[in-house]
Image: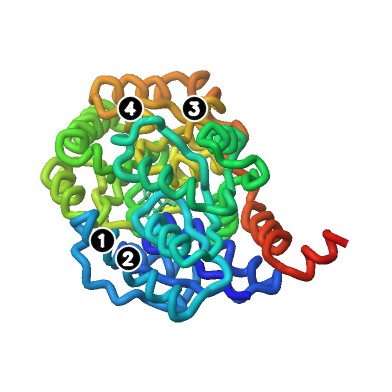
């Protein structure tokens, strides 16, 4: 039985990678379809997790246009499913690739499994368009792999049948735990002086483009100026809307290193050594608690409320004063720091992919159904 894995962005690739082997061990033929939504970032991520795509879409769309991108992905995935029909399609998360993959499969009446189902911020404009994409996938998916109990609850509130939802944990924890022993120390860490605290900064969300990122840059600059014992590493997303703003504001500030996106083994090496993370990334919020690193979330809302409830992350938005005061509390008050570090990761235990493969085997393999019915 062929299971198509549709993935096109860096986070999707990192979160889909650990499912490939368990699917093969469960007797399926996994087929990796690289959509090409992210160019170089996707190639970097595929190399990091050692996956060679079985098929690449032709592309040819304008990725700056969400409609052109979505239409192109839908058309090309639809043609693949029509002429070379898989037995099931897996999509992950909340991207245009995930939505187009789910819709193309659904329109060809192919069962759809949604990994990381049920995340909800409650605001269709934040994160945009991710909140809409994941909500749109819910009514057309057949198997909903919820990372947490909260995600399961959200799906039930959306009317998804309880027997179609499984709590599996988030597959990124499988990836990050596997990577923890295989990291590669990037050159930027050589600049770190003894006793310095490392702060990892990332920001790329569309809602933060322009003013938001500028405000974050002002906060980072003030933080570095006020605390000579910290060093900030900022791998800036390759999207020109992000890296141009960042270079302009932080290109030449002492103890702030604005660098190109790090490969995953390098990024995890930096994360492991970090004292604190400032980020608007979804995946980074999920990974940091595995290394006891507190996260200040540079957003007004999060669909990953588990991190806030578990006390491993705090929402601080993009207002420089708010960022500064939250960061300084963690830098100066060891008690406040210890309260955030050293808690369990609420997003999983590293076994999500095995669970998903076992569920798919149970749900899709006819011999098993027959045995169960008997
Ligand atoms: N990441 C990486 N290199 C970097 C920055 C991030 O490998 O320079 C990884 C990070 O570990 C996480 C993922 O990329 O797993 C997050 O991607 P991104 O922030 O682009 O997307 P989001 O998670 O917000 O959807």
Residue at the outermost left position: 248
Q: Which tag is nearer the camera, tag 4 or tag 1? A: 1
Dots 2, 3 in contact, CB < 8 A:
no
Which numbered marker is on residue 131?
none
Q: Secondary structure at mark 2?
A: helix
Q: CA distance from mark 3 to mark 1?
A: 33 Å
Dots 3, 1 in contact, CB < 8 A:
no
Residue at 69% from the left image edge and 59% from the top image edge: 363
Dots 1, 2 in contact, CB < 8 A:
yes
Which numbered marker is on residue 308?
3
| Mark 3 surroundings within 10 Å by alpha-carbon count, few (fewer than 14), some (14 through 19), many (20 or more) | some
Asked if residue 110 lies left or right of residue 42, the reply is: right
Q: Secondary structure at mark 1?
A: helix
- Where does label 2 land, which residue? 73
> Which image quarter holds the N terminus?
bottom right
Q: CA distance from mark 3 to mark 4?
A: 12 Å
Location of residue 357 with respect to 296 vertically, above or below: below
Please tell me which of labels 4 and 1 falls first in the chain: 1
Q: Position of residue 216 (x, y in %)?
A: 23, 34
Which numbered marker is on residue 69?
1
Please tell me which of labels 3 and 1 falls first in the chain: 1
Residue at 44% from the left image edge and 62% from the top image edge: 107
| Mark 1 surroundings within 10 Å by alpha-carbon count, few (fewer than 14), some (14 through 19), many (20 or more) | many
| Mark 2 surroundings within 10 Å by alpha-carbon count, few (fewer than 14), some (14 through 19), many (20 or more) | many
- Where does label 4 land, which residue? 300
Dots 4, 1 in contact, CB < 8 A:
no
């Amino acid at each position: 039985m062929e299971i198509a894995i549709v993935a096109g962005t860096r986070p999707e690739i990192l979160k889909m990678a650990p499912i490939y082997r368990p699917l093969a061990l469960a007797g399926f033929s996994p087929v990796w379809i690289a959509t090409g939504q992210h160019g170089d970032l996707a190639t970097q991520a595929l190399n990091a997790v050692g996956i060679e795509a079985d098929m690449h879409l032709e592309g040819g769309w304008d990725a700056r246009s969400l409609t052109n991108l979505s239409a192109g992905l839908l058309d090309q995935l639809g043609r693949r499913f029509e002429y070379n029909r898989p037995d099931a399609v897996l999509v992950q998360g909340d991207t245009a690739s995930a939505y187009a993959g789910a819709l193309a499969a659904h329109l060809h009446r192919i069962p759809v499994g949604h990994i990381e189902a049920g995340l909800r911020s409650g605001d269709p404009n934040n994160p945009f368009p991710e909140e809409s994409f994941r909500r749109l996938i819910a009514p057309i998916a057949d198997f909903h792999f919820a990372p947490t109990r909260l995600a399961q609850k959200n799906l039930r509130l959306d009317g998804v049948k309880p027997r179609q939802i499984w709590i599996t944990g988030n597959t990124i924890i499988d990836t990050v735990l596997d990577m923890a022993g295989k990291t590669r120390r990037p050159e930027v860490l050589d600049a770190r002086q003894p006793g310095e605290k490392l702060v990892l900064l990332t920001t790329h969300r569309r809602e933060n483009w322009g003013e938001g990122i500028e405000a974050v840059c002002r906060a980072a600059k003030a933080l570095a100026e006020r605390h000579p014992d910290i060093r900030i590493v900022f791998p800036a997303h390759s999207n020109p809307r992000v890296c141009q703003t960042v270079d302009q504001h932080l290109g030449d500030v002492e103890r702030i290193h604005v660098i190109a996106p790090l490969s995953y083994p390098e990024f995890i090496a930096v994360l492991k050594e970090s004292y604190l993370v400032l980020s608007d990334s979804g995946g980074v919020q999920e990974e940091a608690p595995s290394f006891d690193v507190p996260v200040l979330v540079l957003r007004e809302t999060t669909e990953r409320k588990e991190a806030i409830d578990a006390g491993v992350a705090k929402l601080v938005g993009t207002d420089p004063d708010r960022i500064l005061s939250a960061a300084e509390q963690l830098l100066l008050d060891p008690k406040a720091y210890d309260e955030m570090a050293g808690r369990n990761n609420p997003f999983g235990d590293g076994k999500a992919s095995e669970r998903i493969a076992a569920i798919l085997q149970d749900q899709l393999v006819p011999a098993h159904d027959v045995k169960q019915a008997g």
